[in-house]
Image (cartoon, rainbow, N blue to C red):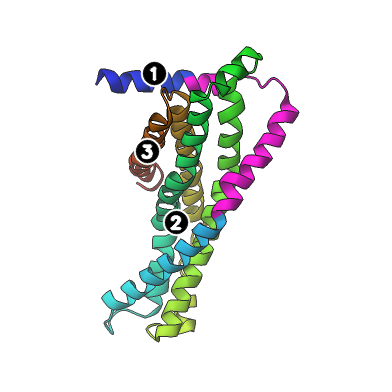
Amino acid sequence: MNNFLTHIGRYILLMRLVFKQPEKKSIYFRQILIEIEHLGLDSVGIVVFISIFMGAVLAIQMAFNLDTPLVPLYTIGYATRQSVVLEFSPTIISLILAGKVGSRISSEIGTMRVTEQIDALEIMGINPATYLIFPKIIAALFFNPILIMISIIVANMGGWLAGSLTGMVPSGEFIYGLKAFFEGYDVFYSLVKSVVFAFLIVSISGYHGYYTRGGALEVGEASTKGVVNSSIAIIIFNLILTNLLLA
């Protein structure tokens, strides 16, 4: 328990350092653009790949379990859309990004710590917490909602393709289900979760990298801890946000 509270305290103190006034804003703007490419654009491929198969599997499972004349076929499209928008895209994709992006952040900052590059930044009068973590947080907060929107669109397309190609759901019925009873608040809820999860991934992974001590082995351990702890935080906050926004 004491160890847990120590980590919480150090994490809060680090976040205070991260959001201090930047020394030179032009440098940070350029750094944010670089991080958008590394953390956002480089993740588009895996997000699209996972989403299209995720949507396809969802549609096939819905069609298999709702195989009764009492339930209209468009319900499959509706249920697929709701599952993708409310849970699968914001949560599952964020967990995937926690592995891909989180491990990169932890190992990158951890390597800089053990090779004394962070100490060199401090000697030059630069706040290393702001310089290394702040641009990553801003980039993730900006681009993660875009990734989630891409995931939602592609997953629903995957469901439509699976239903049409297998003959389980006629194209017209599935598309009608995608449009039926649509509420914009569902998308808002999904985007709120994506923003919160983006902050958790970057800040927790950055924390473990920043306080790495030792050598290459400890960098690997910090990377693992960053992924595991950010994934746990995503699951916990998923429950909290669901109760706050949908209950």
Q: Nearer the viewer, residue 81 or 208?
A: 208
Q: Quote the CA–CA distance across marks 1 and 3.
A: 21 Å
Q: Secondary structure at mark 2?
A: helix
Residue placed under numbered mark 2 in the picture: 89
Residue 188's x, y, as percent? 51, 50
State the mark number for residue 9: 1
Residue 67's x, y, as percent? 28, 81
Of labels 2 and 1, earlier in sequence is 1
Residue placed under numbered mark 3 in the picture: 224
Highlighted range, magenta: 14-43
Pointers 2 and 3 in contact (CB under 8 A)? no
Amino acid type indicated by mark 1: Gly
Q: Residue at x 52, y 66 (%)?
A: 154
Q: Secondary structure at mark 3?
A: helix
Of labels 2 and 3, earlier in sequence is 2
Dot 2 crowding, Cα within 10 Å, few <14, some 14–19, many 20+: many
Q: Quote the CA–CA distance across marks 2 and 3.
A: 23 Å
